[in-house]
Image: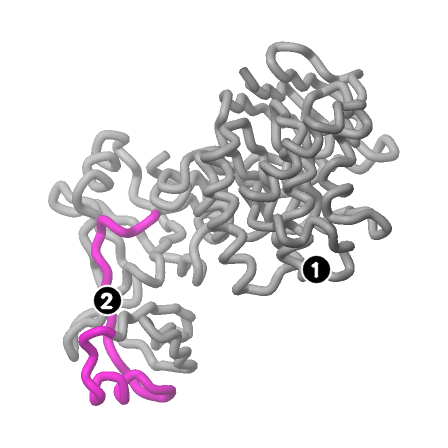
């Protein structure tokens, strides 16, 4: 059992700077939860409070139904992997991994067994006699993970462990963390500013801003049903297009009017608006770049290409409408003729459209989703 519960947790520095505000979260046994948000949002501070490396200003943190506010880090049965690896440069890989076992005076035979097991899982057996300076960044991170693994902790904490790696290594290590999670089967709390890591790793994602939780949900939930404009724009790459529009009610149906076009809000979203009896109003309309499609000439919304980013399997088009609104459009390259590709170059004009079922509607003042 490794349930972690944070109740009304707050962190204040120097009696004035609030880093974490009223944080409430219940993490289930063996769940993988990711804290994600921009720099300074309080995600690492929250993780460090769970670890016991930061004092809690208010609230309680429980691990296995035991309040750990006043427990030292060594007494919380947690392991933590840091962004900068935190390896001992004068020790071999073997001794770095074995270090927490040495502190607990584990018998030598058991030390060899646990280190060998961790090294095999992480694919670093051949490096056990090397010093950290002889390893690549990815290898050093594996050593840091191995050192945390050998303790068999109740809770595994990871603070931006991949941020110092290049893009290729990050992708590789992300896959290895997914496999590692299946093998060691414990509770994970993972901090990152990278929404791709959050979406691929987490059972649930905690999205933070300015010390507050903006939304907690599965990757599907936060992508498909963002609670507010911040979550909508933070999750997804390229980020969601957002712009002012009008929500109108005509002949028993809701429509959105934007760029001279009128688009029916159909499906579940239209039914929910009717059920809520949502009043017609100015809104912030959100549409993801991948949900915008090319339209026939003289139909839909006219756009001019400003920048064409060729990404291989798709093209990212940075466009501007006739009323100077910037839109990003993702166009799959499969099936495009050479003429169609030429027509999407900078300076060319083309038409786009999108369906009502892919639209996200936000209140202009509160920025909350109208369909929460």
Residue 237 is one of the magenta-drawn residues: no
Disc 2 crowd rating (10 Å Cα; few below 14, some 14-19, many 20+) is some
Residue 355 is one of the magenta-drawn residues: yes
| Depth order, front residue of 280/223 | 223
Judging by the rendered image, the residue that carries numbered circle 1 is: 135
Callout 1 secondary element: loop
The part of the image, by quadrant, that contains residue 309 is bottom left
Please name the residue shown 27% across and 89% down the image.
Answer: 342
- Seen in the picture, residue 242 relative to 142 is either above or below; the reply is below
Image quarter (top left, top right, bottom left or bottom right) of the C terminus: top left
Q: Which mark is residue 293?
A: 2
* Residue 157 shows up from this direction: yes
Image quarter (top left, top right, bottom left or bottom right) of the N terminus: top right
Pointers 1 and 2 in contact (C-beta within 8 Å): no
Q: Which x, y percent locates residue 211?
A: 66, 37
* Residue 320 shows up from this direction: no
| Depth order, front residue of 256/149 | 149
| Magenta part of the chain | 334-360
Q: Which x, y percent locates residue 23?
A: 62, 27
Q: Which x, y percent locates residue 152?
A: 62, 27
Q: Which x, y percent locates residue 368?
A: 45, 40
């Amino acid at each position: 059992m490794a349930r972690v519960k944070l109740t009304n947790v707050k962190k204040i520095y120097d009696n004035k700077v609030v880093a974490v505000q009223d944080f409430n979260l219940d993490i289930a046994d063996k769940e993988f939860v990711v804290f994600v948000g921009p720099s300074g949002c309080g995600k690492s501070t929250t993780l460090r409070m769970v670890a016991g490396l930061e004092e809690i200003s208010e609230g309680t943190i429980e691990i296995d139904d035991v309040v750990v506010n006043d427990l030292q880090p060594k007494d919380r049965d947690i392991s933590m992997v840091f962004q900068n690896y935190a390896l001992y440069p004068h020790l071999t890989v073997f001794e770095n991994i074995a270090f927490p076992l040495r502190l607990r005076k584990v018998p030598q035979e058991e030390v060899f067994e646990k280190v060998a097991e961790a090294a095999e899982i992480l694919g670093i057996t051949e490096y056990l006699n090397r010093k950290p300076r002889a390893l690549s960044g990815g290898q050093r991170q594996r050593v840091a993970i191995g050192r945390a693994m050998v303790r068999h902790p109740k809770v595994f904490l990871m603070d931006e462990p991949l941020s110092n790696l290049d893009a290729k290594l990050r992708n590789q290590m992300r896959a290895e963390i997914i496999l590692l999670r299946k093998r060691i089967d414990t509770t994970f709390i993972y901090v990152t500013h990278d929404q791709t890591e959050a979406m691929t790793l987490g059972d649930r994602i905690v999205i933070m801003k300015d010390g507050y939780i903006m939304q907690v949900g599965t990757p599907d939930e936060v992508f498909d049903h963002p609670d507010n404009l911040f979550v909508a724009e933070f999750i997804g790459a390229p980020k969601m297009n957002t712009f002012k529009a009008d929500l109108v009610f005509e002949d028993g149906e809701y429509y959105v009017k934007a760029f001279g076009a009128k688009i029916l809000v159909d499906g579940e979203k239209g039914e929910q608006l009717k059920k809520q009896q949502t009043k017609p109003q100015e809104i912030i309309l959100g549409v993801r770049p991948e949900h915008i499609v090319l339209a026939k000439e003289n139909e839909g919304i006219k756009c001019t290409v400003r920048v064409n980013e060729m990404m291989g399997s798709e093209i990212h088009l940075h466009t501007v409408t006739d009323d100077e609104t910037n839109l990003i459009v993702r166009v799959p390259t499969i099936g495009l003729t050479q003429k169609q590709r030429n027509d999407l170059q900078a300076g060319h004009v083309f038409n786009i459209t999108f369906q009502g079922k892919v639209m996200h509607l936000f209140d202009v003042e509160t920025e909350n989703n109208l369909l929460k």
